Amino acid sequence: MIKNREGQVNMEPLLRAVNLTKRFGGLVAVDDVSFDVRPGEVIGLVGDNGAGKSTFIKMISGVYQPDGGEIYFDGKKVSFIDPRDARDLGIETIYQDLALAENLDVGSNIFLGREMKKRFISEKLSRNIISLVFALPLSALLAWAGLQFYKLPGLALGLVFGLAFGVVLGWLFGSITQLVDRRTMMGESTKALKRLDIEIPSLTQQVRNLSGGQRQSVAIARSIYWNAKVMIMDEPTAALGVSEQRKVLTLVRTLAGQGVPVIIISHNMQDVFAVADRIVILRRGKKVGEQVAAETTPDKIVSLMVGAETVDKMGVIPKALDSNGDPAEA
């Protein structure tokens, strides 16, 4: 039984990785790592460069397929061929580049690749009109050609084939009378941002004109709108100013308060301790520790990240730590 910062009790893991392993040739990037995430939790995933954080996250988000181990989602064993499979289950990943189109406005980015459409005429009427547009000239052309070679039978065949081709083309192209429904997209975007208490002065401005924190907010709102059940964020506060960092961290806790678990990869210990309920530490591809954030310290986490002996030699912490991250007996 685990409680998050909001005091919510989390029982069963929503996402569970069991003994995941990933190799690249002779290099073992992730070695037998187990990991679980419960609804409403914020998990800090930390480790030095090359510790295997990104590789591990890419396995549970469908970018890489594990060479060993299993992934369970909502109690069921799952496997991902590509990131689309993970997204279909509700596992959303926001990388540092955010995957936003800077030349488009906020609404267009939230619906990027999934634009809402509307028709200015019904699909049936559209198909009938397009069928006639193609059928009339085709029938005339084929009828004329048939008449030249086969007289009246050729004329009849030309008319029949022309009408048939027109009907087929009408069915194929009948959907082109759809237009992007920008008004509805803007309305839905406003609701998505309001749900997360995100304030952006104008949703019609291009994303390139937004601040770093606002861009991060748009990327998060997009994932939540499309029913994200687990949010993975890679260095969400990198290259942001102090005030923008605070807004993003507040947004993370808002997500957790709404029951959406968040996995944060970060080198910034201050940010991790500000929002995380648990902290998972990787070193050289192995999981070397898991700590409740409220019951540990940055020094202990750093000692696990780089090895207690290294940290003691550097003087970062005053005492050597044992393998559990506790002060060694004198």
Image (cartoon, rainbow, N blue to C red):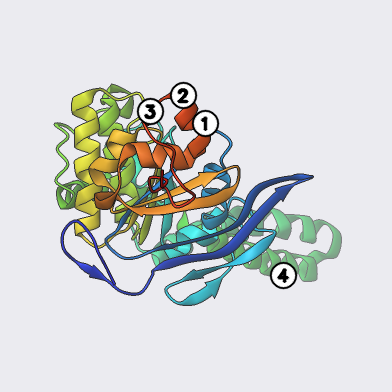
Q: Secondary structure at mark 4?
A: helix
Residue 127 visible to an observer of this rendering: yes
Q: Residue furthest bottom?
A: 75
Q: Which residue is mark 2?
A: 314
* Number of numbered markers: 4
Residue at mark 2 to residue at mark 3: CA–CA distance: 44 Å
Q: Which residue is mark 1?
A: 310
Residue at mark 3 to residue at mark 1: CA–CA distance: 43 Å
Q: Give the residue type at disc 1.
A: Thr
Residue 92 is left or right of residue 276, and the answer is right
Q: Dot 4, crowdedness within 10 Å: few (<14), some or many (≥20)? A: some
Query: Is residue 138 positioned above or below 89 on the image?
Result: above
Residue at mark 1 to residue at mark 2: CA–CA distance: 6 Å
Q: Secondary structure at mark 2?
A: helix
Q: Which residue is mark 3?
A: 102
Residue at mark 3 to residue at mark 4: CA–CA distance: 56 Å
Pointers 1 and 4 in contact (C-beta within 8 Å)? no
Pointers 3 and 4 in contact (C-beta within 8 Å)? no
Pointers 3 and 1 in contact (C-beta within 8 Å)? no
Pointers 2 and 3 in contact (C-beta within 8 Å)? no
Q: Give the residue type at disc 3.
A: Glu
Q: Dot 1, crowdedness within 10 Å: few (<14), some or many (≥20)? A: some
Closer to the eye: label 3 or 4: 3
Q: Which residue is mark 4?
A: 156
Query: Is residue 97 positioned above or below 92 on the image?
Result: above
Considering only order in the chain, which callout, 4 or 3, is on the residue closer to the N terminus? 3
Q: Residue at x 68, y 70 (%)?
A: 160
Query: Is residue 4 positioned above or below 328 on the image?
Result: below
Q: Secondary structure at mark 3?
A: loop
For this rendering, which residue is in front, 276 or 81? 276
Closer to the eye: label 3 or 1: 1
